[in-house]
Every structure is written in structure tokens, then in C-alpha cells.
Amino acid sequence: MTMSIKLVAGNSNIPLAESIGAYLNVPLARCVVRRFADMEVFVEIQENVRGEDVFVIQSTSFPANDHLMELLIIIDALRRSSARRITAVLPYFGYARQDRKPGPRTPISAKLVANLITHAGADRVLTLDLHAGQIQGFFDIPTDNLFAAPTMVADIKDRLDTSNVMVVSPDVGGVVRARALAKRIDAPLAIVDKRRERPGESEVMNIIGEVEGRCCILVDDIVDSGGTLCNAAEALLAQGAKEVRAFITHGVLSGGAVARIASSKLKELVITDSIQPTEAVKVAHNIRVIPIAALMGEAIGRTATESSVSSLFD
């Protein structure tokens, strides 16, 4: 793919940025992103970007605030260096779960972060599996929301007998995402209905759908503590499911999540490398990471050449 673009990477996921560069045959631009003694972020772009089409690759994953600040400062450095167009490439958009007011006097942080990225000087945004589709509307600049589903579907078809697969949404809110994947592999859909009768009581999980004898695949955008997934796996197995796997785009996996999943009844958790996998994730016996560099790279290439990005998912 011949194009004149620059790829700049923050520190959040350098292996992914390098893989995207390899896919596009474009080396990462020379750039220093470091900390002063008081942890202030300092950025220096060490090559000419005047008039260039620049893509900044940075997931706002843990530590979220550090990585967000790096992204904003890199964008500002590029804008002041006269880059022609700056695209913020966010394989994982942190703060996405704060997309509405769950109670009085609470923030809508996803909108605030969208404003920060826009005001820093980004001209467009490229991201993957947003927690809620309407977050695209929080940005007043063009925003492409890619889907990991085709990558996951290829993996499922490669490894499993799809004739006995049942796709499961771990909650009512994720039905649209699960249905889209189920449609691609021509599989039926089940839903886990969680409810808490009274505060402080454990959740009761009702399974909507006939899962007996099926290979169940839980589908979601984010796995954080892993509690919901592990509980859903138990509930599905109790209803006679043959085995339970999970295909989740973003492996946040905070706290003791990896240990919880490793000791759970989940046959396998499959995540993408939108967030750089930790050492614990790499050695866990039932967690597998699938790469998304080709998907992100293809979308960057199409953006650069003004080609259709949506046709990636036809």
C-alpha cells in the first residue's frame, strides 16, 4: 500500500502500533514520549510532519489518565508542527462506560474525553467496538467505529463446529452486539438476564434460550473484573450447556480478574490486543489473544486513501 502517512505511537500499546506499521509497511515516526521527574508528560516529534496525514495510535487503557494525557499532548505537538490532518486511533476508548448520568450530580465523562480530544486538535477519530454506539455522537469530528466481529467470526469458524454453537449475550444491554455476531455465523441467540431482588443479595441469573448440549459463546465489548462472565458461565453450564467460551474485544482485566478467569469454568476467554496484554494474561491457560493490527491497519490505509471503511464489514 503506497501512501504518504505518518504513524505516531504513545506508550500504551507499542507492540500493536509496530504491528500496524508492519501491516502498512510504514515505520513508526521517531517520537519521544517521556516523563519529567514530577511525572509531567513531555513529547517531542523528531521528524518533519508539516503537511502530513498523521495517525496517533494510543489506547486510553490503564493507567487511563496517563495515556489520555499522552494522547492529548501528542496531538497538540503535531498541530503546532503543522500536520495537515491528525487522526486519533484509539483501539480502546477508555471512559466509554461513563456515557450517561447513572444518578444525580454525576458526570458524562465519555463526552468530556471526546471534547478534550477534539479541542487538542484531532481532525478525526478511529476506534474499535465502542461501549455504546451513540458515543460517536459525542464527537463533533468524523468518527469511525470499527468492529472486531469479523476477526472473531474467522477465529470461531476456524476452531469450532458452528452447527452446535449458541451465541449468548451476558446481559440484556449487549443483545444487539451478540445478535450481529450470531447472524454472521448463522447461530441462535440466548440472553442472560441478571437481576438482584434486593440490595446486598447475590444476582439471580435466568437464561433466556435453550442452551442444553450447546457450545455457548459469550460475546461482549469489555471484560473488566470478569465476575459477570464467570457467573454467566456457571449459570449456562447449570442449564446443560456443553462448554462456555467468551469472545470479548477489550481485555481490561483489572485487579484479580485474570486469576478469577483462570480458576473459573470458562473453557476459554478470547480477547484482542486492543489493550496490551499483561504477563499474567499471556501465561493464563484459558486466555487467548487474537491480533487486530490487520483490521486497524486496513482502516488507517483506507482513511488515508479516502476509501470506504464501512465496506470492511460488508
Image (spheres, grey):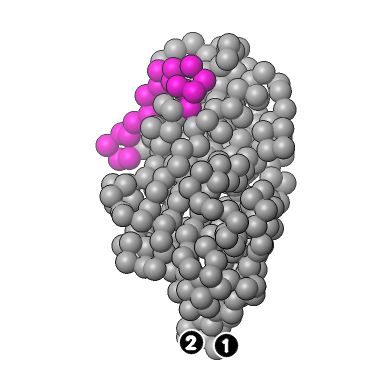
User: Magenta stretch?
Assistant: 20-39
- The residue nearer to you, when weighing 26 against 98, is 26
Evaluate whether residue 295 shows in this view. yes
Q: In which quarter of the image is the C terminus?
A: top right
Q: Label 1 sits on what residue type?
A: Glu
* Residue wearing tag 1: 197
Residue 285: where, in percent of width, then height?
31, 54
Q: In this view, does 292 lie to the left or right of 147?
A: left
- The residue nearer to you, when weighing 304 against 105, is 304
Residue 304: where, in percent of width, then height?
64, 20
Distance of mark 1 from mark 2, alpha carbons? Answer: 7 Å
Q: Is residue 53 magenta?
A: no
Badge 2: residue crowd in 10 Å (few <14, some 14–19, many ≥20): few
Q: Which residue is depicted at the point 49% across and 58% down?
A: 246
SS class, disc 1:
loop
SS class, disc 2:
loop
Q: Label 2 sits on what residue type?
A: Glu
Q: Dividing the picture into quarters, in which one does residue 5 lie?
A: top right
Badge 1: residue crowd in 10 Å (few <14, some 14–19, many ≥20): few
> Is 237 above or below relative to 158?
below
Evaluate whether residue 98 shows in this view. no
Q: Quadrant of the N terminus?
A: top right
Q: In this view, does 294 lie to the left or right of 269?
A: right
- The residue nearer to you, when weighing 263 against 253, is 263
> Is 311 above or below relative to 245?
above
Q: Which residue is depicted at the point 39% across and 42% down?
A: 276
* Residue wearing tag 2: 201
Q: Is residue 226 left or right of residue 216?
A: left
Q: Are marks 1 and 2 in contact (CB under 8 Å)?
A: yes
Q: Dividing the picture into quarters, in which one does residue 208 lie?
A: bottom right
